[in-house]
Amino acid sequence: MPTAITKIDSNVTGLRFAEEETLKTLPAAPVWYPLEPNSYSDFGGQITTVARNPINPSRQQKKGVTTDLSASGGFNQDLTHTNLTRFMQGFMFADIREKNTTTPMNAVAVAITAVDAATKAYTTAAVGFVAGDLVLASGFGVAANNGVKTVATNAAGEVTVAEALTDEAAPPAAAALRTVGFQFPADDVSIVYAAGSYPRLVSAATDMTTLGLIPGEWMYVGGDAAGAAFANNAGFARINAIAATYIEFDKTDWTPVAEDGAGKSVRVFFGDVLKNEDDPDLIKRRTYQMERTLGKDADGTMAEYLTGSVANQLTLNSPQAQKITVDMTFMACDNEQRSGADGVKPGTRPALVESDAYNTTNDFARIKLSSVSGVDAAVTPMFMYATDLTLSVNNNVSENKALGVLGAFDTSSGMFEIAGSLTAYFADVAGVQAVRNNADVTLDICMSKQNAGIVFDVPLLSLGNGRLAVEKDKPVTLPLDIQGAESKFGHTLLFQVFNYLPDRAAA
């Protein structure tokens, strides 16, 4: 006689999510993306019952009735390069602004049907690549066809590149091309700078407005080869303004100096951008279904679902000498359970894309909290070192209840809020004075790992707390509270993914 199932271990459970087509309704062919939870804060539906309590001689309550259900889910996972971007669209209430790619996140992929060595060409429909684009080729079966390539032409269904390729008659379905930067022609660009102004990357031949960049996003200036970078102006930089002949930076990783680019073909690298949009036409609420499998009963895989889930709170945790982790919570309309006989809901379930976790020891290329300056792109930071940092996104989602509905019929979203905290080693009183004076402050976090990177940027914030902590035999520390605000760029938070960075960008 088979042994009865008496328990289910946590290690046999799994977590996936799918985007809904409309509230609580999946598309005809949903895709269930995998997640890697470390722990759960909550998950499922909490039932409220009210007992009948009439006056009666037995002094006993009558059986209660179910009156309400609150559904929500929360979990913690490590931050990797591949496991947050899709969900960030939900927390930012916006579509990602991707650079040209054959595998867009929110549209149908464009197939690459062949690689021709003789013509150095990828056979694929045009997706906007232009001469000078640096594209990251990935997923090809032949190693030589992967890596960063420089676009020469894009016409007649072929993207030709400067680098040598190997014949590949039928590339895998996962093969892709994605713009990750641009290489300027030789002698084309220089850095124009004068004290008391922002530095500019000035071009003689390239129209900077055609690169698909926006004010507020970041780029990395400089390639690995000696002729692909300036000698003195290289590193992360934030774009303040764009015109046909120049890109102006209001934050730089370097101390700007005027520099001629003669004899150089300078490379710049950029990424895909998510920000909370100020244009109502660009604000988009996404709803999800969260699937947690619960092991198997005698008939198959059991599962529970949160339906009509809206991204509510996200917290980036950066403790000292640890992995960087992310806490995410969702407010849902309802939850469902399915037995093994019911099975999991239909759809495609891709395999997890393996990626190493970012950590707080090796992977911070830049953390800078400084005053907002209208003339200095390399403002002195308020601190040199910090012991911990948290940054939180809050959409203030609440349930909409109604008569005749168990659970919520919908949810409402409140103000988009950015908050956080940071503990810095005290070196001077600038941080304390900034709190007292309610100064305009900005925070950016640039991470780099294995030739890729992530940026969190809060262009404008105010500081709170600021009471120095003085303990015997310990360094003096400065605890600070962070409150973001709408910036000159029209957003409070910008999240950017660099799908490729040169070796020199390593933290």
Image (cartoon, rainbow, N blue to C red):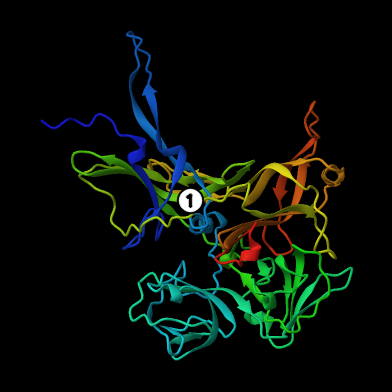
Residue at far front of view: 226
Amino acid on which disc 1 is placed: Val
The residue drawn where x is 43% and y is 47% is 36
**The N terminus - image quarter:** top left
Residue 283, above or below 162 = above
The residue drawn where x is 38% and y is 14% is 55
Corner quadrant of residue 48: top left
Point out residue 415 in the picture as x, y percentages from the top left corner: 62, 51
Corner quadrant of residue 463: top right
Image check: 433 left or right of 99?
right
Residue at far top of view: 57
Residue 245 in sight: no
Point out residue 76 in the picture as x, y percentages from the top left corner: 50, 43
Image check: 435 left or right of 62?
right
Residue nearest the viewer, comparing 304 with 252 = 252
**Helix, strand or loop under label 1:** strand
Can you identify the residue that label 1 sits on?
Answer: 310
Residue 236, above or below 357 = below
Residue 180, above or below 152 = above
Residue at far right of view: 195
Point out residue 35 in the picture as x, y percentages from the top left corner: 43, 50
Point out residue 3 in the picture as x, y percentages from the top left corner: 17, 30
The residue drawn where x is 33% and y is 78% is 170
Residue nearest the viewer, comparing 437 with 36 = 36
Corner quadrant of residue 423: top right
